[in-house]
Amino acid sequence: MRCYYVFVHGRLDWLPEPSASEDAGAIKPAGFYCHRYVLAGSEATAVETAFRRVRQNLNTRAGWLRDGLATLDLEAEEVAIAGIHNLLKPDNRGHTFYEDE
């Protein structure tokens, strides 16, 4: 098992039908960037774990996917072996959102 750094790019595709729970002034970002440090046995497993954690975080904080307001396409922009000490830090659950590509 190794510590991996996974830099994730997410693209949000907003569904055309407005939801009753959707606020009129709510922001609808086109996508976001974030990173995760994960413990995994391979690069592929690290990417899967990072993607799962990103999806869970978005569902918990924003609910866009859970509520069926958008679909999400995730891509690992960078995957690298990182120092194990990175796992001792609190998980960075932040995202850097952008509006247009």
Image: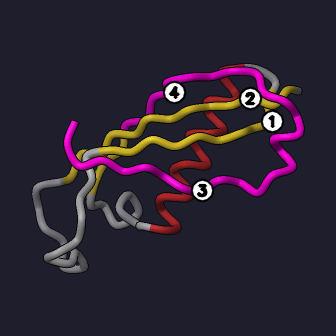
Residue positioned 56% across, 32% down in the render: 7
Question: Tag 2: residue type?
Answer: Tyr
Residue identified by numbered label 4: 76
Q: CA distance from mark 4 to mark 2?
A: 12 Å
Secondary structure, mark 3, is: loop
Dots 4 and 1: beta carbons under 8 Å? no
Give the mark nearer the N terminus: 4 vs 1: 1
Pick the residue in front: 96 or 58: 96
What amino acid does circle 4 point to? Ala
Instruction: Identify which amino acid the numbered label 3 is placed on.
Output: Arg
Report helix, strand or loop for mark 2.
Answer: strand
* Circle 1 SS class: strand
Marks 3 and 4, how far apart at CA = 16 Å
Q: Secondary structure at mark 4?
A: strand
Q: Are marks 2 and 3 in contact (CB under 8 Å)?
A: no
Apparent side of residue 92 relative to residue 88 in the rendered image (left or right): left
Numbered badge on residue 93: 3
**Residue extent of the magenta highlight:** 73-101
Residue beneath the point at 13% across and 67% down: 18
Check the image and report above or below for 42 versus 57.
Answer: above
Residue annotated with mark 1 = 39
Circle nearer the N terminus (4, 2): 2
Viewport quadrant of the N terminus: top right
